[in-house]
Amino acid sequence: MDLKERIESAASVREASDIVFDEIKRMTGSRYCYVAYVDPENGDSVGIKFSHLTEYCRHYEEMGEARFKLPSSGKYGGLLGYSLDTGESFFTNNPAGHPAAHGIPDGHRKVSKFLSVAVKDSEGILGQIVAGDPPENYDETHLRIAEEIAGHYAGVLRRFWRGEIPRE
């Protein structure tokens, strides 16, 4: 079974997220990864599979998610929120120098290379895939790989938004 089929045939968002997490890390060489969906009820960004970069990550994992509320401004903000706010996928090998960067949250491990893909379809943004710190710099090839995987994940998230598959 190829990667597209593995992701798109997942029986839940959790199952698809686990596949996406493993494959993004493997195919881009990234040390870290974060896979999220946008909650169709309130617009929150919900990390469902993620590397542990803070002391709170164990707590988030026990809860089953790392939820970032959609601010009243309608923009998540910062480097993490940039692809969700703009719908644009990007990478930077100097995260602190990116125009959307506004510092690292207290207790968060520093990431020196950052890639973020908006998971979307023709109807809108459904989620996000973020990766960090491969052994080499990110380039357009890494971005294309992540965008292709995001395209497959978008189909799963659209099914979730329609109530056709469960989260877990």
Image: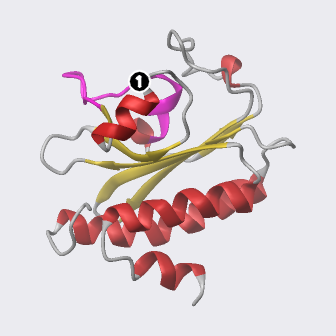
User: Which residue is found at the position 48% from the left and 22% from the top?
Assistant: 78
Q: Which image quarter: residue 31?
A: top right
The magenta region covers 68-83
| 141 left or right of 52 in image | right
Q: Return the residue nearer the eye: 61 or 44.
A: 61
Rendered location of residue 166, percent (x, y): 21, 67
Describe the element under mark 1 as helix, strand or loop.
loop
**Residue drawn at x 49%, y 85% as measured from the top left:** 5
Depth check: give the residue in front, 123 or 53: 53
Image quadrant in which you'd find residue 99? top right
Of 47 and 148, nearer the camera is: 47
Q: Is residue 159 above or below residue 13?
A: below
User: Which residue is denoted by mark 1 in the rendering?
Assistant: 77
In this picture the colour scheme is: secondary structure
Q: Residue at x 58, y 79 (%)?
A: 3
**Where the C terminus falls, by quadrant?**
bottom left
User: Label 1 neighbourhood size at 10 Å, few (<14), some (14-19), many (20+)?
Assistant: some
Residue extending farthest bottom: 1
Magenta-colored stretch includes residue 71: yes
Up-down: is 164 above or below 113?
Answer: below
